[in-house]
Image (cartoon, rainbow, N blue to C red):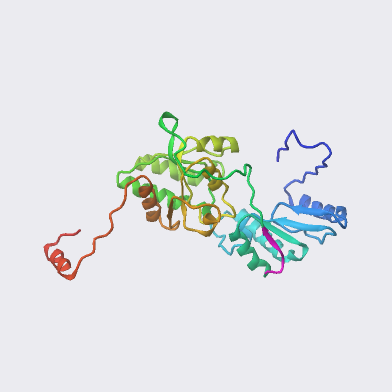
């Protein structure tokens, strides 16, 4: 973590290396340092390993820790880490006085975990807390507009790039080629990035992976995109949804609770269906799909005998 240059000089900062030994040392140090009357904000999802003398509030933002979703698609190290953290959270609930989460959906899942015995408050916050424009509009026009759609997300399985890419492939087979920008770290998700490059080469899809970007670069990219598409299957908060909406972008997103906690998308879809995602894109760009024509019995028999179809 890089500390800000403008940080107050009277604040004592202790850094902890991301190793088991240093984390355990920190837990012991905190147990010794905290006195009655102290306020402890744990900003990293997990309760103290040891009971503290002060008031302990835990900010929980990792949905993997409280949602019974399967971990089998994650890398081995990530699965092990999350299993340990799930166990840590379950076994140390007694060391927490209050939890903070950012959405009603996170509160719902955490209440199941705590059996309603620990107070939970919903306190969402972002870098800029101004609201949304009254009417979403395309942020860019003309030469400044690089992409029809942008998806700001890393490459973890729950981000659902696979169905998004399949949707783009389906659109291409219909002769529809909207441009899409992704933000996937090539070093951490090499197979996924290779798959994207292969699809673009074989099917002439217009997909650009900008790679891992810092926050300022992401905000700049919103201004060069027409809309945000966000097929993630679950989120604790979904900051790109908020940032894109604040930037004035229309949002296409799943019909899921975590989305409705934050905003109302201009188009919704089933994140488990690439067909549904593709249809939402077509509706958004004005290529409405005609409804299926219903036949009566006589029409059905006539078409069956003639060998024709609708």
- Is residue 68 rendered magenta in the image? no
* Relative image position of residue 95 (x, y in whole percent): 77, 63
Q: Is residue 223 above or below residue 33?
A: above
- The part of the image, by quadrant, that contains residue 88 is bottom right
Q: Is residue 184 visible?
A: no
Q: Main secondary structure of the magenta part?
A: loop
Q: Is residue 39 visible?
A: yes
* Relative image position of residue 65 (x, y in whole percent): 64, 60
Please give left or right for residue 83 compared with residue 36 in the image.
left
Please give left or right for residue 224 compared with residue 129 in the image.
left
* Relative image position of residue 240 (x, y in whole percent): 55, 46
Please give left or right for residue 206 compared with residue 293 in the image.
right
Please state which of residues 182 and 256 is positioned toward the viewer in this rendering: 256
Seen from this angle, which residue lies furthest front? Answer: 134
Q: Quadrant of the C terminus?
A: bottom left
The structure residue drawn at horizontal position 50% and vertical position 58%, both measured from the top left corner, is 256
Please state which of residues 110 and 247 is positioned toward the viewer in this rendering: 247
* Relative image position of residue 267 (x, y in whole percent): 42, 51
Range of magenta residues: 116-121
């Amino acid at each position: 973590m890089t500390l800000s240059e403008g940080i107050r000089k009277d604040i004592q900062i202790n850094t902890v290396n991301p190793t088991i030994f240093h984390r355990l040392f920190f837990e012991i140090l905190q147990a010794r340092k905290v006195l009655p009357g102290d306020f402890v904000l744990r900003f990293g999802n997990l309760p103290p390993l040891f009971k503290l003398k002060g008031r302990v509030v835990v900010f929980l933002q990792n949905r993997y820790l409280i949602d019974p979703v399967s971990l089998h698609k994650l890398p081995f190290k990530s699965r092990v880490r999350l299993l340990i953290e799930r166990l840590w959270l379950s076994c140390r609930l007694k060391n927490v006085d209050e939890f903070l989460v950012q959405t009603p959906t996170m509160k719902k899942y955490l209440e199941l975990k705590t059996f309603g015995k620990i107070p939970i408050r919903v306190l969402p916050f972002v870098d800029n807390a101004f609201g949304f424009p009254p009417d979403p509009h395309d942020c860019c026009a003309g030469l400044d507009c690089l992409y029809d759609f942008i998806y700001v997300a890393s490459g973890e399985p729950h981000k659902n790039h696979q169905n998004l890419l399949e949707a783009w492939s389906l659109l291409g087979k219909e002769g529809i080629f909207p441009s899409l920008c992704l933000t996937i770290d090539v070093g951490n998700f090499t197979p996924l990035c290779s798959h994207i490059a292969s699809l673009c080469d074989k099917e002439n899809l217009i997909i650009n992976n900008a790679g891992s970007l810092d926050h300022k670069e992401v905000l700049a990219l919103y201004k060069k995109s027409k809309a945000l598409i966000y097929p993630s299957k679950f989120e604790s908060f979904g900051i790109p949804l908020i940032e894109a909406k604040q930037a004035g972008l229309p949002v296409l997103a799943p019909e899921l609770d975590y989305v409705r906690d934050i905003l109302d998308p201009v188009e919704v879809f089933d994140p488990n269906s690439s067909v549904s995602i593709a249809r939402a894109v077509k509706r958004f760009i004005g290529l409405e799909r005609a409804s299926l024509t219903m036949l009566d019995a006589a029409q059905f028999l006539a078409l069956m005998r003639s060998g024709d179809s609708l």
